[in-house]
Image (cartoon, rainbow, N blue to C red):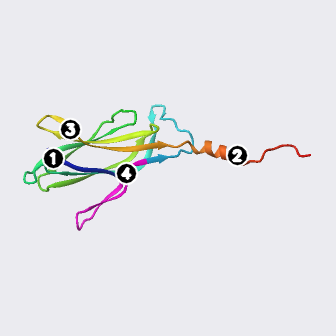
Amino acid sequence: MARHVWSVLCYKGCLDQYTNQVSLLDVIEAISIKPAEPVPETQGDKEIRVPVQMTLVTLLARSDVAVPEVGMMRVRLVLPDGVSRPPQELKFDLTKHRRLRNFTRIQSLPLRGDGYFNFVVELRDEAADEWRTAAEIPLEFKVEPYAAQEASANLQKEQPARGSSS
């Protein structure tokens, strides 16, 4: 089974075409959103999703550098309420190269209130016929009070008291 070296959640991973080195731009540990109005978690049967721009960059390597191998990797999203979404699976080939980088783009997350999303990276252990967790990358998600409440509260504070002048 291949070896998981690291996984990092970031804004973008850039691969230099001349040196084959990767640069991770803006590592992401938490996201805070401030809606302009109250937003329910669902609209009828549709889930509310928050647009994000993130990439989960993973480096895998051969378990024995002299022995080529192929395998399966998957990334599973576990929501703050503990519900696990269906994973994205990919087959990887380490027969020509000793290591491999994978860039998984994430364009939106379901709105679930405050909590932690966990991106779970798993590798398939063919000998044991099971998936093994290689890494869990937490992402803190914070929903601030919506701006209309704050704007209304600030407006009330700033207005002078009205009364009759005699």
| Callout 4–callout 2 Cβ contact below 8 Å | no
State the residue lying farthest toward the bottom.
18
Q: Position of residue 71 (x, y in %)?
A: 16, 44
Amino acid found under the numbered disc labelled 1: Ala
Binning the other alpha carbons within 10 Å of mark 1 as few (below 14), some (14 to 19) or many (20 upward) gives: many
Q: Which of 23 and 70 lies nearest the eye of the viewer?
A: 23
Q: Which SS class for mark 1?
A: loop
The residues tagged by marks 4 and 3 sit, at their Cα atoms, a distance apart of: 24 Å
Mark with earlier residue (1, 3): 1
Give the residues in magenta: 11-30
Q: Is residue 83 left or right of residue 155?
A: left
Q: Which SS class for mark 2?
A: helix
Given this view, does label 4 or label 3 mark the residue nearer the observer?
Answer: 3
What residue is at 77 percent from the left and 47 percent from the top?
160
Q: Quadrant of the N terminus?
A: top left
What residue is at 15 percent from the left and 50 percent from the top?
93
- Pointer 1: what residue? 2
The residues tagged by marks 1 and 2 sit, at their Cα atoms, a distance apart of: 61 Å
Q: Residue 157's mark?
A: 2
Amino acid found under the numbered disc labelled 2: Lys
Mark with earlier residue (3, 2): 3
Residue 17 falls within the magenta-colored stretch: yes
Q: Which of 138 and 53 lies nearest the eye of the viewer?
A: 138
| Callout 4–callout 1 Cβ contact below 8 Å | no
Given this view, does label 1 or label 2 mark the residue nearer the observer?
Answer: 2
The residues tagged by marks 4 and 1 sit, at their Cα atoms, a distance apart of: 25 Å
- Pointer 3: what residue? 132
Residue 162 falls within the magenta-colored stretch: no
Residue 25 lies, with reference to residue 70, above or below; the image says: below
What residue is at 43 percent from the left and 39 percent from the top?
115
Q: Position of residue 145 (x, y in %)?
A: 55, 42
Binning the other alpha carbons within 10 Å of mark 2 as few (below 14), some (14 to 19) or many (20 upward) gives: few
